[in-house]
Structure formats: structure tokens, C-alpha cells
Image (cartoon, grey):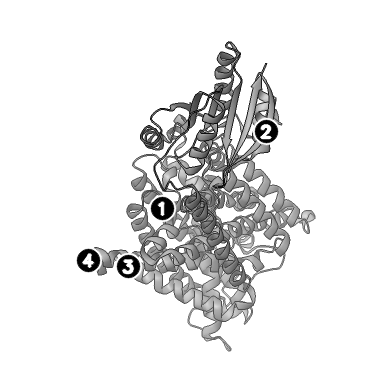
Amino acid sequence: MNALKRLLVGKPLKSAENDEQKLTRFAALALLSSDALSSIAYGTEQIVVVLITLSAAAIWYSLPIAAFVIILLVSLTLSYRQIIHAYPHGGGAYVVSSENLGEKPGLIAGGSLLIDYMLTVAVSVSAGAEAITSAIPALYGHQVAISVIIVLLIMMMNLRGLRESATFLMVPVYTFIAVISLLIVIGLFKIVTGAAPLHATALPGTMVPGISIALLLRAFSSGSSSLTGVEAISNAVPFFKKPRAKNAAATLTLMAAILGFFFVGITFINYWYGIVPEKEVTVLSQVGQAVFGHGILFYVLQFATALILAVAANTGFSAFPILAYNLAKDKFMPHLYQDRGDRLGYSNGIITLAAGSIVLLFIFQGSTERLIPLYSIGVFIPFALSQTGMVIKWRKDGKGWLQKSIANIIGAFISYAIIAILFAYRLDDIWPFFIIMPILLFIFYKIHDHYKKVAEQLRLEEDVKLHTYEGNTVIVLVGNVTRVNIGALNYARSIGDYVVAMHVSLDEDVKKEKEIEAEFKEKFPDVRLSIVHSSYRSIENPVIRYVDIVSKKARQHNYTTTVIIPQFVPKRRWQNILHNQTSLRLRFRLSWREHIIVSTYSYHLKK
């Protein structure tokens, strides 16, 4: 299994190599913009699909709707640039909302984005599967299977680390940018030169019988789905090379410029050529056919679209683990989401996202049309909350706050309007969101309550007193200085006269190491503290090596070595680790000491 893991994921990276994994603007654009750019494949189509329910003549309304979408894009881009500079440590909407609006709005923003990133993956790969079946009709009906395979492949790619993911994504992302740019330039050239006469279903300004504000608002809310993914860069600022905030802001601006150009260009060409949506062929595919014909460029477009839609899920895989890390740091998600994997990525977040996305694909049978409304509500709630939070932040700062918050006010207004539209006209599609969110908030608070209770149990309330007894060599694994450590060290004194407190320090936790060392010297001045460093974020291997060294020395004097692992550590796992990987035999014993909920797992190492 270890050999298979090395083959699929690669060899472990040292914590010291973390800075080498950071991204340049060029690489970050590929890694973090794939979701936003891929929405070109379905953004215009979502507007036209709503308008066509009235009549083909209503397609001309896609032009003013596109203009309003661009206004929202500019507002969000300016706002998220401010967020990047104000919060350079990442976290995006969750951190902004928590700091300026309070805990609950922050959790709503964070929970919405967790759901949204799962939907990002599901929508992206399902749209990619539809693009594949458009090009290869024989595969039609197997969209779910294709989508699941794509999710698993992207998960494996992300487990290999940031730099490898970005390198892989450069090909599909920049190929897509090149092909769409060529499509728009050639399409506009044909229009300007008269090679492509107007085939629009109706001229701008034509009154279409039955048109209503409700229909236009529904079309606008659907088209706004093109803006999902804009917030991802603000969440992932720590991924950038220094100066991080400057590089992240520049990458966001470039991404927004490309997205705006593509969205306006595709929408206009679609209108000019009079393209009407068809069931088994995407609108972008029809635009490509109209501009390129059935030549090689058409098939390159189809291939590039399928690739960008498939890898667009990677934005979710980049942003979800960082968001989960921030929630875990605040004790609203399990602490395991703070752990880095062998390749310095947050592996638990990556795997969780893949699992959740696959579940959604099966529930919605890979239908992009059914997933899009949920996708929109999941992203516009954080949009609205983050814009509101920034307005409050500027207001607190005082002078000149109104000028700074203009973009935030516009973005907040439009975002709240879209939420209201979705609630009024798409409730049948988005109702699951209002069931999932309360459940998610309940889970957040239960996790937080658990950590509060654990902290209360571990807190030191009085002077520390250790009792000394005769015995042998005892190694006690210690983390922070807590009540559990006192119980474990007292027990160690009861069975040994030579006690060593061992702490495994990760290279990236230098500050924490110094704090523990100072606190330990203050509380336990007569106990030897031995700090062992781990370059690969592993606790198990340093413990095994240290136990071997100490126990061999103790054995020379016919001493028995006991390893004490305090409570809140999986005892069976450590029993197996020490039994199978140390050079000495073990006798396992679980011991309950006193009434302060201190249990110790003792491993007696003998010849």
C-alpha cells in the first residue's frame, strides 16, 4: 500500500520545501481561474435557455442582461481586490464576514462556500461530461460515470501538490484561452467584414409579447452563475509567491478581464448568428460550428472546452481545503483539516471534497441544469455577506469610508437582489440549500462545543505538583501543557525514576515549539523535556526512532522502558505502530488514573 501511495501521490516533501511550492501569477491563473473561465461554456447558454421558454425572439434580451452581469463582475473584482489586501492570509468571505458581521454570518458564509465548492466540482465535471458526449454522441447516457472518473483523477492530481497541479492545468487552461480568443476574434472579423450577415432572431428593442420582469430576472440570475469562482483567489492568497497580496490581486484582475471579454464576446456572437439552444448540443458548440465550420478548429474547441470544464473542478479542490483549514483553526471543523499531507497539501480537505461531489453527482444524475441554481445560491450568499462586511470595515476605519466602499455597496446590492430573485423564482430548485445549511450550522456548533469541553477538561487550574517514585525509564509524549500531561507525568513518576517528556515539533511550528518549551520549564522544571523535530509532518516515525534509542540505552542497565501516550490519542493505532515498527517486543496495558478523565496507554518494551 505504501508503494502504491508513493506511485500515485509521490514521495513526501519536507516542510522546509513549502515556499518552493508557492505559485507565480502565470501558474496561479491556471490553478485558480479554471472555474470562472469554464463558466463561459454554459453562462450564455443559461441566459438563453430561460429566454427561449417565451420565444426565440426574446434572445436579444441576452445583450442587456450580459451588460448587467459585467457590472456585477467589475464590482466583485474591485471588492475582492480590497479583501485580498485587507486579509492577505486568505479566508475570503468567511474571514471577512466573521470579523465584521459576527460568528453566525461568518459560519453561514463559510458553510455556503463549502457547499458551493462541492457544487463547483459537480457542475464542472458534469458540464465537462456533457461536452464530451456532444463531441462523441456514442457516450451519451454515461455522463455520471464519466464525471466520477474525472473527479477521482483531479483528486489524485491535487494530492500530488500545488506545483504539480498548476503545471498540469496550464495546458488545458491556456489552450482554452487561446481557442476562445481565436473564436471571438474570427467571429467578430466575419461580422465586421460582412462574411457573417445578421441572423438574429429579433433586433434589439423589439417588443416580444409576453415578456416580463420576472423572466428577465430569472435569466439574469442564471447568467450570473458565470461569476462563480471569482472569490477563489481571495481564499487562496497563501498559495502565491511573495509579495502574496500583490500577486493575488494582479491575478484576479487578469482573470476578470479575460472572463468579461469572453462572456460579452460569446453572448454577442450567439445573438448575431441567431443560435437557439438544442437538447443534445451545447450553445458554445453551435457557436463554434457557426464560426469555425466542421474543420479542425471546431474539434480543438470541443476538446479544449471538455478539458477546461473537467479541470474547472480544480478551483474547488484548491479553495475548499483552505476554507476547511480556517474553519478548523477556529474549532468549527475537526482539527484534522489543519494537517498537511505528504505533498504539503491539505489532503483531508481534498478527499472530503471529492467524496461530497461524487454524492451530489449521483443525487442529481450529473444534470448541469439542475445543479446550477443550487450553485448560484451557494456563492451569492457569501458574495453578499463579504460585500456587507467590507462596507462595515470601511465604516469602522472612518474617514473616506464611502469612497472606499462604493464597489462593495454595488456588489452587495446586486448580490442581495440575485438572492431575492432565486428565492422568488427558483425556490423549487434551491430548497435543498435551506435544509442543508441549518444542518451544517448545527454540526459546526456541536464541533465547537466539543473542543470547548475538551479545553475545559485540559485547562490547568492550580499549581502543578509531581510525585516521585522509584522505577525505570519512562517516556511521556506531550503536546500542550494540560491536565492530561500532569496526570501522565504523575503516573510516570509512580513507575519510574527517570522520566523523559518528549514533544514532536513540526518544522513549520517554530513559534509553538518555543511556547511549549517555556511553559514546560515553568510548570515542570525538574522533568527533562526532549524536543524531536519532524521535517515531514509525521509524529509516528520520530516517536519510533526516539523510543528505540532510549530503550536500547535503558536495556544496557536492565531497565524496562515504558511509553505513555495520554488520552485523546487512538490507543489501538499506537499499539500497532509501536508493536510492529520498534525493535523491541511490547506488552500493552491500558491504565485509568484518578477521576480527572486521564487515561494512559502504556507500552512496556522488554528484551
Which disc is residue 398 wearing?
4
Instruction: Where is residue 72? Give x, y as percent.
Output: 42, 68
Instruction: Where is residue 456? Give x, y as percent.
Output: 48, 52
Q: Residues within 10 Å of mark 4 (few under 14, many from 20)?
A: few
Q: Residues within 10 Å of mark 3 (few under 14, many from 20)?
A: some
Q: Quick check: 531 above or below 429?
A: above
Q: Residues within 10 Å of mark 1 (few under 14, many from 20)?
A: many
Q: Quick check: 485 above or below 362?
A: above
Instruction: Where is residue 17? Give x, y as percent.
Output: 46, 30
Gap in Å between the C-alphas at discs 1 and 3?
Answer: 23 Å
Q: Which residue type carries mark 2?
A: Arg
Q: Which residue is mark 3?
A: 392
For marks 3 and 2, the one nearer the N-term is: 3
**Extreme residue in the bottom direction:** 209
Q: Which residue type carries mark 3?
A: Ile
Give the quadrant of the N terminus.
Answer: top right
Gap in Å between the C-alphas at discs 1 and 4?
Answer: 27 Å
Q: Which residue is mark 2?
A: 589
Res 212 seen here:
yes
- SS class, disc 2: strand
For marks 1 and 2, the one nearer the N-term is: 1
For marks 1 and 3, the one nearer the N-term is: 1
| 288 relative to 137 in the view: left or right | left
Q: Are marks 1 and 4 in contact (CB under 8 Å)?
A: no
